[in-house]
Amino acid sequence: MAHHGEEPPISGAKGSGTIFFSHCNLGCLYCQNYEFSQMGAGKEYTFEQLAAIMLELQGLGCHNINLVTPTHVLPQILKSLELAIPQGLKIPLVYNTSGYELAEIIKLLDGIVDVYLADSRYGDNLIAKELSQVCDYVEFNQGALKEMYKQAEPAEFADDGLIRRGLIIRHLVLPNQVCATEKIMKFIAEELSGDIYISLMSQYLPYHKASGNPKINRRLKAAEYEEAKQILERNHLLNGWIQESYGQERFAGVNIKPA
């Protein structure tokens, strides 16, 4: 699909060529796409069919191929790329990930992936275990982000504002400050770069099983998002986008504007 709900330099005017993959390596209680990520909704495709979809999206004028939750099917994606590239696939490849990645695997993508669109969800492993069913998120996330930064920075943009190469880090602000935003931004500023583009998202809604957890069973408050914005400023992270909808729209790109 031509998706217009990503950050402006990814969606652009004609949309991002988005391919959602069923299942995920996280089990987030609040996943807004749980039908795909945890219930397995979707269809099976051959390598040839996936390659054809990529070429079709390019033919529609999409600015990039946007692979959403690709980690667990990476070998199949690479095989499909081997088929699609000789047939003319040439638009940038976006690796859209939860950020729970092995740095060793990200190293293998050097020269293949153009844009990393990566979450940094938690600064604390205990809450990662409670909300996403993984006990070592922080270490793997930080290691993967370091490798992505090594490969893709500094970010490069075309004259029309579209990103051609680079790293965008997404952070979804959760209620009650449970995601430890301060720790995440401190890591980015001190161990990566103050020039990295951050997408600070306010769109949280208590989807899926979130209503059963008292820490996250409500919408984000405007004051909580304002505090997260102040954390960005304190850490001198001034590149990127903020989102003013406070959960009233489903997709990230809606109401996003430059920070």
Image (tube, rainbow, N blue to C red):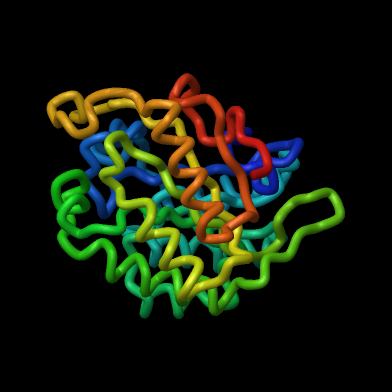
Query: Which residue is at 47% across, 26% downward?
Result: 246
Quadrant where the image shows the N terminus: top right
In this view, the residue in front, 191 or 131, is: 191
Farthest residue to the right: give it: 159
Position of residue 192 measured from the top left corner of the image (x, y, whole percent): 51, 73
Query: Which residue is at 42% across, 53% downward?
Result: 119
Q: Is residue 108 above or below residue 176?
A: below
Position of residue 204 measured from the top left corner of the image (x, y, whole percent): 38, 31
Residue 159 in view in this figure: yes
Q: Is residue 36 above or below residue 152?
A: above
Position of residue 20 measured from the top left corner of the image (x, y, whole percent): 44, 42
> Viewed as shown, does residue 108 lie left or right of 255?
left
Query: Which residue is at 63% across, 65% downward?
Result: 195
> Viewed as shown, does residue 100 lie left or right of 79?
left
Quadrant where the image shows the C terminus: top right
Residue 41 in view in this figure: no
Position of residue 153 measured from the top left corner of the image (x, y, whole percent): 62, 72
Farthest residue to the top: give it: 248
Number of marks drawn: 0
Query: Which residue is at 58% across, 35% downward?
Result: 253
In this view, the residue in front, 185 or 113, is: 185
Q: Is residue 168 above or below residue 144?
A: above
> Viewed as shown, does residue 154 lie left or right of 123?
right
